[in-house]
Image: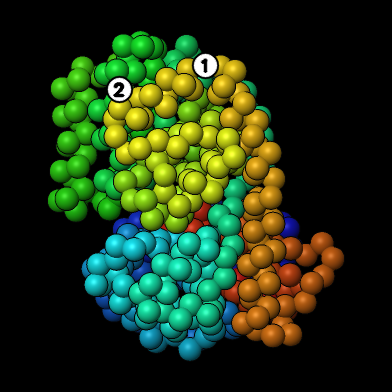
Amino acid sequence: MQQLNPSVVHRVIPVEGNNPDCINNPKHGNEVIFVIKRNVKADYLKAAEHANESDAQVVSLQYEFGMYGGERGSYMRDFVNQLNKPLVTTLHTMTNNFSDVERETVQMISEKSAAVVVISEAAIQMARNYGMHANNFVVIPHGHDEPIQADKEKAKEALGLSGRFVISNIGFVMRYKGIDLVLDAMPELVESNPKILHLIAGKLWPPMSDPHEVAFRNELKEKILKYGLEENVKFVDKWLTESEKKIYYQASDVILTTYRDSDQISSGTLADAVGNGNATISTGYVHAKKVLGDGRGLICDPTPQSIASSVKIMFNDEVRHKFERRMRGYGKNSTWPKVAERYLEVMKTVIPNTLVKAENSIIESRDPGLALVGLVAALMLIGGYFYSPGNGLAIYAPLM
C-alpha cells in the first residue's frame, strides 16, 4: 500500500490462533503493535482500547463466527461494546438457522454498527426474519481478482499433477462444506475417469484443538481408505498463501463448493473461482445461484449421486470451456477495485465530508473493499478478510 501511496502507514494486530504464520511474517516489518490471543477474552477489550486511542476515524469489522474466540465468535461482542468509533461491519455469514448465540451476536453487532455490509439482498431479508430492522444494511458483492485465462497445463506441471483431471475444494476444510459428499461420489467418478484427482487444499478449521473437527478430518481419511482412493485424493493440509491459492485454482479443471446450507450467502472459494475463470459446480445455496445462474456453472443437489453426475458433464472439454468463458465475463463487474469503490461510498456515509476523492490515490486491498481516497481519513480494520497474510486488525493512518 505504501508503494501505491507513500503517505499511508498501517499497523496490524493479528489474531493468534487463526494463522500462526501471520505473527512473525517478515512482510509485516514493524507493523504488529498488539496480538489478540483468539481465546483470551480480555484481549478483545484491549483491542478496542487500541482502536479508541488511535487516530482512526472509522473501524471496519469483518465478522465470521469461526474467526474469533468464545462460543461462535461471541468474544467480539466485548470489542464492539467497548468501541467508541464509527463501525462498519461486513457479515460473511447470514442464515435462517442461527443458534441463539449466533443470532444474539449478529443482532448486537448490527445494532452497534453505523453500516452493515452483506453480499446479497437475501441476507437482508434473513436479518429481518430475526426481527432486525436492517435499515443500515447495504449490499456489496464479494470481490475477486481480475478474471484471467490461465495456462492450466503449466500450473498442473508445477504441482506435479500433469495428466490428471483435477476437481478441487480450496480453502478452510470445514464440515459444512460437504467435502465428505465429494469423497462419497469419487468411486463412481474414478470408474468413469481413472485419472481424476480430488484436490483438498487448505487447513482444517477450526484448529485441530476442536474435537468435533478432528473427528471430521478422521472421517475423511477413513472414507479414502474405505473406497481405495489413495491415488485419487490429495490433501494439501496447510495455510495457503495468495500465490499458492492462485496456482491451485489455475491447475483445477473444476472448482467445487458443495455446501450443505442452502442459506449460505457468501463463499470466498466461489468468488476466487470467478476471479480465476474456473468451471464450477455448487450446491444451490444463495450465493451460488446468483453467480452460476444464466449458464455460468452447474448447480447440484447435496448428494454424492448429483455431484458425480455434474462432474461427469464437466469431463466434456467443450462444455467446461464454455463455463470458463462465461465466468470470466461475469467477473469483470466485481473485481477488487470496483468493490473497494463501493466500500468507500459506505465510508462516506459514516464519516460525512471526510473522504474526498483525489486523482490516482485509491489504496486497494486484495480482500473485501479496502480503499482510502484522498487520504483524509484513517481507517482501522478488524478481522481476517482484509489483511490476507493473517487474521487480525490493521490501522491505516496518514503519516505524520
Q: Nearer the viewer, residue 30 or 326?
A: 326
Q: Which residue is mark 2?
A: 186
- What colour scheme has been applied to the protein in the rendered image? rainbow
**Residue 51 placement (x, y as % from top left):** 48, 80
Secondary structure beneath dot 1 equals: loop
**Residue 156 placement (x, y as % from top left):** 51, 20
Rate crowding at label 2 as few (under 14), some (14 to 19) or many (20 or more) other CA atoms within 10 Å.
Answer: many
Q: Amino acid at mark 2?
A: Met
Question: In which quadrant is the N terminus drawn?
Answer: bottom right
Secondary structure beneath dot 2 equals: helix
Q: Residue at x 38, y 55 (%)?
A: 263
Vertical arrangement, residue 60 with respect to residue 318, above or below:
below
Q: Nearer the viewer, residue 352 or 19?
A: 352
- Residue 364 in the figure: left or right of residue 128: right
Q: Which residue is mark 1?
A: 316
**Residue 91 placement (x, y as % from top left):** 45, 66
| Residue 122 appears in the picture as rendered | yes
**Residue 238 placement (x, y as % from top left):** 36, 40
Q: Mark 1 or 2 closer to N-term?
A: 2
Rate crowding at label 1 as few (under 14), some (14 to 19) or many (20 or more) other CA atoms within 10 Å.
Answer: few
| Residue 59 appears in the picture as rendered | no
| Mark pair 1, 2: CA separation | 18 Å
Q: Residue at x 53, y 74 (%)?
A: 137
Quarter of the figure with residue 363: bottom right
Vertical arrangement, residue 258 with respect to residue 392, above or below:
above
- Residue 376 in the figure: left or right of residue 268: right
